[in-house]
Amino acid sequence: MRKAFVICLILLIVFGGIAIAGDIVGRRVAQNEIAKNVASQYSLDHTPDVSIKGFPFLTQAIDGRYDEIDINVGDLTQQGVHLTDTKVALKGVTAPMSDAMHGDSSKMVAETATSTATVGYDDVNKSAPRDMKVSAAGSDLQVRGPYTVLGITRTVTATVSVQPSGRSVRVVPQSVKAGGTTVPLGLVRQAFSFTMSVNGLPLNTRITDVKVESDGLRVSTTAQNVKLDSLNVR
């Protein structure tokens, strides 16, 4: 009796180990194939990191539904805009098992897709009014540049707000100073306001949040019912 119990226990351990090994291998294969697909879409010179969440993987694969797939795209350039530390989280992903294992994203759809990326100030400056520069001042964003009133040109510094606006970021002055003197907003509001488009966002995504960081604007986006093969559709 005891011998039979030991044999059963050994078999359970062996088959359990095989199942775990198969789960690990299957997950790794699917992650690698999805990474290759994303690299091709974005014309990356590197392979992004892909992580399929949830355990066991094989159960999700058989059901054709994955709780979450995280993609660390890293750095990329889209339509002249350089994005850094780009990350995408796909939740509620449906995909046939064979497609996931072979990296075929044509039928993969995520219920929600959220992404974050940083737009450096060099690229933000491209959208700013002529001769004006954008930079961080702690948690605030500032726009600094020349402004002419009644024939007199002075260097003006505006503390601005950054607001999501669809697939763009809207910059609007909140307070303005010239040489330590406060300038009426009405005089310079239009001159210091501008909109910056953020290219390379997933299909139908909308910017939901913008944070000022030392190296650029950290943009967060969200979208519904996103096809994995359309992540790079503009």
Image (tube, helix red, strand yellow):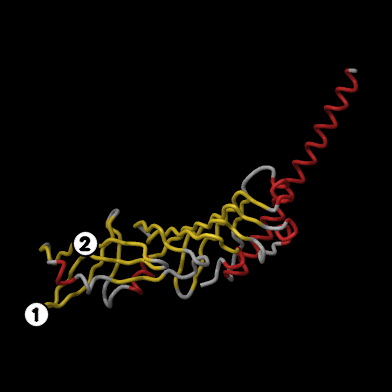
Left or right: where 82 falls relative to 97: left
Q: Position of residue 107 (x, y in %)?
A: 67, 63
Q: Earlier in the sequence, mark 1 or mark 2?
A: 1
Disc 1 marks which amino acid?
Leu
Residue indicated by mark 2: 174
Element type where label 2 sits in the image? strand
Residue at 66% over, 52% down: 65
Seen as rendered, the residue at the extreme bottom is 151
Left or right: where 68 falls relative to 58: left
Viewer-side residue, 16 vs 99: 99
Residue at 73% over, 45% down: 23
Residue indicated by mark 1: 150
Q: Position of residue 41 (x, y in %)?
A: 60, 69
Element type where label 1 sits in the image? loop
Seen as rendered, the residue at the extreme top is 1
Viewer-side residue, 112 vs 21: 112
